[in-house]
Image (cartoon, helix red, strand yellow):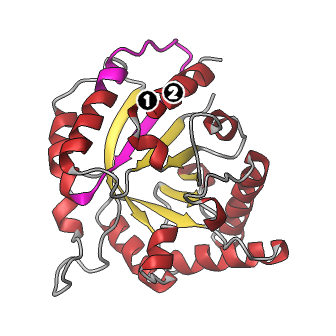
Amino acid sequence: MKDVYIYCNWKIYLDDEQSESLLRGILSSLQTLTLPDNTPNINLKLFPSTSSLRSLSKIISNCDLPNKKLKLSMGCQNIHYEKTGAFTGETSIMAIQGYCESILVGHSERRNIFAEKNADLNKKIALILENKLEPVICIGEPENLLKNDSEGYLREQILSSVADIDISHQVVFAYEPTGSIGTGVATSPLEVNLKSKLIKKILKQNIPHLDLSLIKILYGGSVNNENITDYLSASDIDGVLVGSSSVDMQKFQMILDKIITLSST
């Protein structure tokens, strides 16, 4: 089986104390996992509130996981596209660089609530790659968009986001149709798999030299313990971006159990 990528967006559901408690629960669970020899690498990445990054990073750095196939790291939910300056309330990439491997870019909530544009995201992605971190580029069409217009919409999102940027490093795209974000109505695995193929097609058509093996495609949108294996079993979906289900330890434990069961088959 292919490597598995589980990215967990904690949004601002938890305060710092709750975040530490959840992380310790996750670590305790990971310490007791028994993985069969044929288990692929399981890449678990947590995206907590920015205020929690330093303390959680210290906890992770002081904990050795029992199996090298388990990889646990941190990501940041957002940064500003300038390294420094008069940008009140924003987060500089320099402030989080020592704690994170990845940064979310263009999440639907950032686009819709904070009116972020593709041009803004392009500058963020360039800065992230310049600092040798991994951008997780969120894309997805509005719920009311006609099916025939979907490809053009995604094409514009993808190409404008990476315009004039060398993405020959590992870059992650998270497909998250807005109708599935926080609604409890997940897009079918078949549809997501088709969209994943489409994303790769758009990239290959417009960046012919790109090594698609370095590009990972995740699905985000009402992912939970009941449907996660359906997405991870699909041929062209590399992993998932989990929201609210990842901040509930009981649900998260069930997600882990499902992943281990699937990985060992």
Q: Residue 206, located in which quarter of the rendered image?
A: bottom right
Tell whether position 129 is magenta: no
Q: Is residue 176 above or below residue 99?
A: below
Give the residue displayed 59% in from the left and 50% down from the top. Answer: 222
Give the residue displayed 57% in from the left and 43% down from the top. Answer: 239
Residue 196 at x, y percent in the picture: 69, 55
Residue 48 at x, y percent in the picture: 31, 51
Q: Is residue 209 above or below residue 87?
A: above
Q: Which residue is mark 2?
A: 254
SS class, disc 2: helix
Which sits in the foreground, 185 or 24? 185
Give the residue displayed 61% in from the left and 37% down from the top. Answer: 228
Q: Amino acid at mark 1?
A: Gln
Q: Residues within 10 Å of mark 1 (few under 14, many from 20)?
A: few
From which residue to which does the magenta span run? 27-50
Q: Residue 157, located in which quarter of the rendered image?
A: bottom right
Q: CA distance from mark 2 to mark 1?
A: 6 Å
SS class, disc 1: helix
Q: Residue 177, located in which quarter of the rendered image?
A: bottom right
Residue 5 horizontal side relative to residue 155, left or right:
left
Which sits in the foreground, 14 or 258? 14
Residue 164 at x, y percent in the picture: 49, 80
- Looking at this rendering, what residue extends furthest in the right direction? 148
Q: Quadrant of the C terminus?
A: top right
Q: Which residue is mark 1?
A: 250
